[in-house]
Image: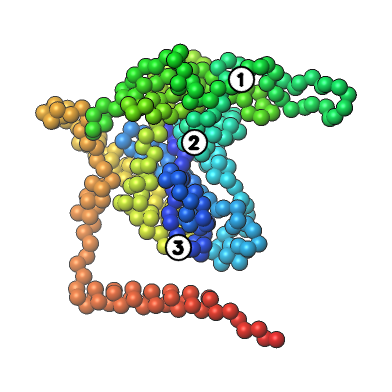
Amino acid sequence: MAQGSTRILDESADEKAGTHHAGASRQDKGRMGKVDLCRVDTCLTSANGGLWAMVDGERFLPEEWFGEAFAQTRHELGIPLERTFETKIALGLKMVKRVKANGVPFDLLACDVLYGRDSQFRADVDTAGVLSAAQVPADTNVYVSAPPVGVPEQRGKRGRPRTRLHVLSRQRPHEVRALARDPQTVWQQVVVRHTERGRLAADFAVPRVWTVAVGQRPRAEWLVIRRDAEGDCSYTLLNAPEDAPHERLIAWSCRRYCIERPFEDAKTEIGWDEFQAQKYRAGEHHLALTAASLWFVAQTKLAWAQACPRDPELARQLAVEVLPALSTANVRELLKAVFPLPQLTLEQATDLVIMHLVSRARSTSSRLKSQVKPHDSS
């Protein structure tokens, strides 16, 4: 997945019953907008058409995990001594730079509001030479023309000399949602893509805007406003060149549509959500095996598409524009046929059940022992 590939930055959370799992804490579960006891992996996935896989991942460790209260827990769960607190944004930027340094080709980085609202993250991605499409919240401030920025003149002789950059004119920024409501905004309807449910179309507006972070020079960016049939709007800032065609900007802004597919396939078909081990290294191994499995599925889908191309005549007969592609569930069924599960005898099944019961009893015993406080020798 090289030419035309998109790298998508996002997180995946799994609920946990306690903080005895590396990184578990009460924290934001991401797209569900819920705070709960969970662990979170920050992941960089790859998408190209109907193919998707995982490229890189990092376990997010909340800041409280690096305090004195978690010192013993860090030791017991094998948190590396060199690990320090890093925000999800810092982890994401590190992965993007790592993938680029390793020469893994991709056309675009796409990310959601968590990353897009951070102007420094967008600036760092731009400095790294990465084309990005970052969703931003509706209250993001932008200028419709480049504002003059500089250090204001010192008024009087008192006080410290001024050094921080400020907008020097009375020009006021606009929230991006205000631009969506502006009657002068020019809209065009575009077919986003052909799906198994039919054509997906939306209205788009593509103004050129400038953003100004505190103490920084203004940055020119493209704003793509998408308005769905229900009237809901989403907003994406792109660091694309000034001469980029609007059609391409709109296409780039829509590249995040399959963000949940790698996570959904990993959890429902591959077993990513069945991870029960507590230690840090075990979590790293499980994440790596999940990524390898997703790549195997993507390679299988590609090989199937090349060997068995979709028949346009069949699409015409069925009166559909797009025939379904091979799914991860289909690949799993093929694997079950090639590697059938052994049929256990009654004695083998009984031994397996007894082994599981004994393992559960041992686990309970181990936890009870860890809860017993040592007697005071004094």
Say which residue appears at 32% left-offset and 26% top-offset: 229
Q: Nearer the viewer, mark 1 or mark 2?
A: 1
Q: Quadrant of residue 141?
A: top right
Can residue 109 be seen by looking at this rendering?
no
| Mark 3 or mark 2: whose residue is earlier in sequence | 3
Q: Is residue 174 above or below residue 309?
A: above
Secondary structure beneath label 2: helix
Say which residue appears at 72% left-offset and 20% top-offset: 150
Residue furthest left in the image: 317
121 sits left or right of 38 in the view: right
Please, what is the three-letter code of the amino acid marked with disc 2? Val
Could you tell me which quadrant the N terminus lies in?
Answer: top left
Please, what is the three-letter code of the amino acid marked with disc 3? Ala
Q: Give the colour scheme of this rendering.
A: rainbow
Please state the horizontal and vertical placement of residue 231, each as a whole percent of the image: 37, 27
Q: Separation of disc 3 and disc 2 at Cα?
A: 28 Å
Residue identifier under label 3:
17
Residue identifier under label 1:
172
Residue identifier under label 2:
113
Q: Nearer the viewer, mark 1 or mark 3?
A: 1
Q: Is residue 313 above or below residue 84?
A: above
| Mark 1 or mark 3: whose residue is earlier in sequence | 3
Could you tell me which quadrant the C terminus lies in?
Answer: bottom right
- On residue 77, the disc is none
